[in-house]
Amino acid sequence: MGKDGDKLNKSTILGMIAMAVAVFVIANDFTALSVAIPAIEKDFGTNVNTTQWVINGYAMVFGVLIVTGGRLADMFGRRHAFFIGSAIFATFSVLGGLAPNVWILLACRFVMGMGGALMWPAVLGMTFSLLPHSKAGLAGGLVMGSAGFGNAFGPLLGGALTDTVGWRWVFFLNLPIALAAILITYLVVAPDASAKGAEKIDYRGMGSLTVAVFALLLGLDLGTRIGWSTGWIYGLFVLSALAYVVFFLVERRAGDAALVPDDVMRNTGFAAACLTVLAMSAIFFAALLYLPQYMAHKLNFSAVQCGAGLLPMMGTFAITSFISGRLYARLGAKVSVVSGALFLAAGMFLLSRLHSGTPYQDLVFGMVVLGIGVGLFYSSITTAGITALDPSRASLAGAIVYMFQIAGGSIGLGANTAIVLSNSNFADGISIAFFVDALIAVCGAAIALFFVGGTLDPAKLASAWRYKHRAHA
C-alpha cells in the first residue's frame, strides 16, 4: 500500500489487528493485576508494601526504559524490536506465573517492564508506518482505543481469573496473546526498510536519562508513602536534576548518534505536545486511583465491583479512541486535542462535586465525559506528536510522549495524594484534588490551543460543518 493510498488492503488490516492485540496485552497487564494483589499477598504471606511493586516496579522500569526502546526500534528495526520485546514479555510472564516466592515474581515483573519498553514504541512506529499519512489519526485512535479496551477489560479479567483458577493465570494468559501478535506481525508486516543498524548506540545518553527518570519516578513514588520532607526524597530529586543536566550536555555532543537527536529536541510542535501531555496526565491517573478508592471506602464496593465501576469511563475512553481518528482527519490536530482537553476539564469539574454521601449513579455522567476527553485527547496528542517529526523518528517520538505521560501521572498522583491526605474528610479531599485537576486541564487546553498542531485550518472546519449538515439532511 502506498503512503498516499486511501484504501487499506488485507495485509494492512491484518497488521493493524496484530498491533491492536499487542497494545491490548500491554494495557491489560497494567490493570489486570490490580485486583489480584490481595491474593498474591495471601499466597506469599507478605503485605501490600511489598506486593505493590508487582505493579509499581513494572511501570517504573517501563517508564525509565521506553525512550531507549524507542530509539533502538528506530535504529535497528521496529519489527525486530517488537519480536525481542514480545519474547521477553511472554517468557517472563510465564516465569512470573510459576514464581515460588514474591522476590522472583518481582524480578520477573521488572524484566517484563523491559520487554514492554521495547514493544510499545515499536508498535507505535509500525502502526503509523502501516497507514498512509492521510490516515495518521486512525493509527492514534487504534492504539489508544486498544489501550482503553485493555485497561477497561483488565480488572474484570484479572478478577475473574483470580476468583476461579488463580492469579497465576493472569500471567499465563499473556503467552498465547503475545504469540498471536508475533505470528500475525511476522506474516503480514514487512521488515523495516529504513532501519539504520550502522548507527552508534548512545550509551552515555541512555545511562544518564535512565538515572534521571528512575530517580524522579522513585522519588515521586516514595514521597507519597513516606513523606516529602526526608533526606532520601531530596537526594533522589537532586540526583534526577543532575542526571538531566548531564543528559542534555551529553546529547549536545553526541550529534546524529544522540539518544534524542537535535532535530527532535528543537521541534517546537513536538515539545508543545509533550508539555501538554505532562500537564494533562495527572488527571487520568488521579481518576484511576481515587474513583475506585471512593467506591471501596464510601460505597463498600468489592475489588471486582470497583473495576466494573470504572467501565463508564474506560468503556467510553475505548469507544471514543476508536472513532477519534476520523475526527482528527476532519477537524485537524488542534481542534481534536483542545476538544479532548476541555472534555477532560469538564469531566473533572463534574466529578469534583462528590461528597461523602454521593451515590454511584451520580458519578456516571462525570466518568462518561471524562472518558470522552481521555479517548479524544490521548489519541489526538499521540498522533500530533508523532507526525510533528520525520517518519523515521516515529517510535522514538511515541516513546518520548509516553514518558511524559508517565512522568506527568507520577507528579500528578503525588500532588493529588498530598491534597487528599491534607484533608480530614477523605471524600472532601478527593473533591478538592479533582477541582485542582480540572483547572490544570484548562491550562493544558490553553497550551494546546496556542502551540499544538500548527494553525487552525478553516477549510477542515468548513468541510466538517458541511459534512455534519449533509449527514442530518
Image: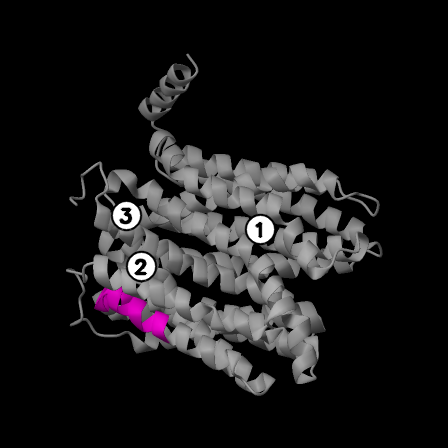
Left or right, 366 with reference to 21: right
Q: Amino acid at mark 1?
A: Phe
Classify mark 2: helix, strand or loop.
helix
Q: Amino acid at mark 2?
A: Ser
What residue is drawn where x is 42% and y is 42%? 322
Q: Tell me the distance, in whole angstroms, between the alpha carbons under discs 1 and 3.
A: 30 Å
Dot label at residue 13: 3
Left or right, 60 with reference to 197: right
Which residues make up the magenta segment? Answer: 71-87
The answer to whether residue 79 of the structure is visible from this angle is: yes
The answer to whether residue 447 of the structure is visible from this angle is: no
Looking at the figure, which quarter contains the C terminus?
top left
Dot label at residue 284: 1
Classify mark 3: helix, strand or loop.
helix
Left or right, 200 with reference to 29: left
What residue is drawn where x is 59% and y is 87%? 101
Residue 394: quadrant of the picture: bottom left
Residue 397: quadrant of the picture: bottom left
| Percent position of residue 350, x then y | 68, 38
Residue at which label 2 appears: 395
Q: Tell me the distance, in whole angstroms, between the alpha carbons under discs 1 and 2.
A: 23 Å
Q: Residue furthest front?
A: 164
- Give the prevailing secondary structure in the magenta stretch: helix
